[in-house]
Image: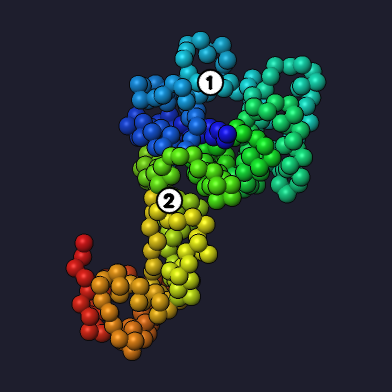
Amino acid sequence: MLHITDRLLSLENMERREAGDLRELYALLLRAGVSKIEVSPAVLEKLGGAIDPSVTVLRLDDPALRCRYPGLAGYIALGFDELFPDDARGVAEIARRGGAPVSRVCGLDALFPHDCAAVFEELLKYSASLEFCPGDALGFASALAVEWIASGGRNVVTAFLGHGSLAATEEVIMAMRVTRRYRPGLDLSVLAELARVYGRAADCAIPPRKSVVGARIFSVESGIHVDGILKSPSNYEPFPPESVGMARAVTLGKHSGRSSVAYKLRERGLSFPPESVSLLLRDIRALSEEKSRGVTEDEFGALVEKHGGKPAAPK
């Protein structure tokens, strides 16, 4: 069984966030399929009674402090429970020396594009319960996490949105759902809400094309793509937008085709004759070229009215 520990709430800059936002992030992460949530002492204090001790891991600077926080699911102390080897031989050397057991291996960013499977096999010989927390210095952390799972690893450490240069929780969850049919039985549609809460709490904008949770990843303009998506969405989308709390959006611009215009007209409950659709498309492309951007809903409504239709009343 796959176990994902999310480290978002243990990262230093999260300690400055409002208690209400932290509690909402904590609850949404659990709903999204995370097995455990790692927090710092400062965040733990702000969360108060809003936590489930059985799924909460505490990150400490000093392992001797564990006795101050009894009853939690686990404890991670930097320099004691974690190891940052250059390769798998670093873990093997500790095993040969008979040193203190390591529960988490971090980093190993440079494994791609080398033989990950062989390295991971050696790591799992040391301990089948080992946690892997891949680093993201080269932009491959999420891929490394998925490779670890494919190699037999069952414990992976991530952070929502890849915060802190770690593997992105949402990317790992969705990659496993698509490639391995992994279904945690929880509500992945909360991922969009989780992104909104994070953006508000951290006072930052989520990149619109961010995989899995970006606001525009299901927006499409090109005519041939719109036609294909409407006929067979699974040929173009690895997962339905509804599964992550979003909706498909057809936008209009210089690359739009008749299928896009017909779809937008149906959204407004309108039906134009073919010749009117062609004229409407011509004006959409011209306006998009003139503005050097896509056509807004209001602009589309005005063009519809120009060609004899009545735009739907704004919602």
How far apart are the alpha carbons under marks 1 and 2?
A: 31 Å
Name the quadrant containing residue 109.
top right
Residue 292 at x, y = what percent?
41, 74
Q: Residues within 10 Å of mark 1 (few under 14, many from 20)?
A: some
Q: Is residue 129 left or right of residue 197?
A: right
Q: Is residue 130 left or right of residue 252?
A: right
Q: Residues within 10 Å of mark 2 (few under 14, many from 20)?
A: some
Is 134 rendered above or below residue 126?
A: below
Task: Look at mark 2 in the image and give the residue it sits on.
Answer: 243
Looking at the picture, which amino acid does disc 1 mark?
A: Gly
User: From the image, which quarter does the C terminus lie in?
Assistant: bottom left
Residue 167 at x, y = what percent?
57, 41
Q: Residue at x 45, y 39 (%)?
A: 185
Q: Residue at x 58, y 21 (%)?
A: 77
Disc 1 or 2, which lies upstream in sequence?
Answer: 1
| Tag nearer the camera, 1 or 2 | 2
Residue 314 at x, y = what percent?
21, 65
Q: Residue at x 47, y 13 (%)?
A: 70
In this rendering, does residue 234 appear at all?
yes
**Residue situated in front as seen by the camera: 142 or 235:** 235
Total marks drawn? 2
Is 289 rendered above or below residue 56?
A: below
Q: Is residue 229 left or right of residue 145?
A: left
Q: Secondary structure at mark 2?
A: helix
**Residue situated in front as seen by the camera: 311 or 181:** 181
Q: Secondary structure at mark 1?
A: strand
Looking at the picture, which amino acid does disc 2 mark?
A: Ser
Specify the label residue 74 is tagged with: 1
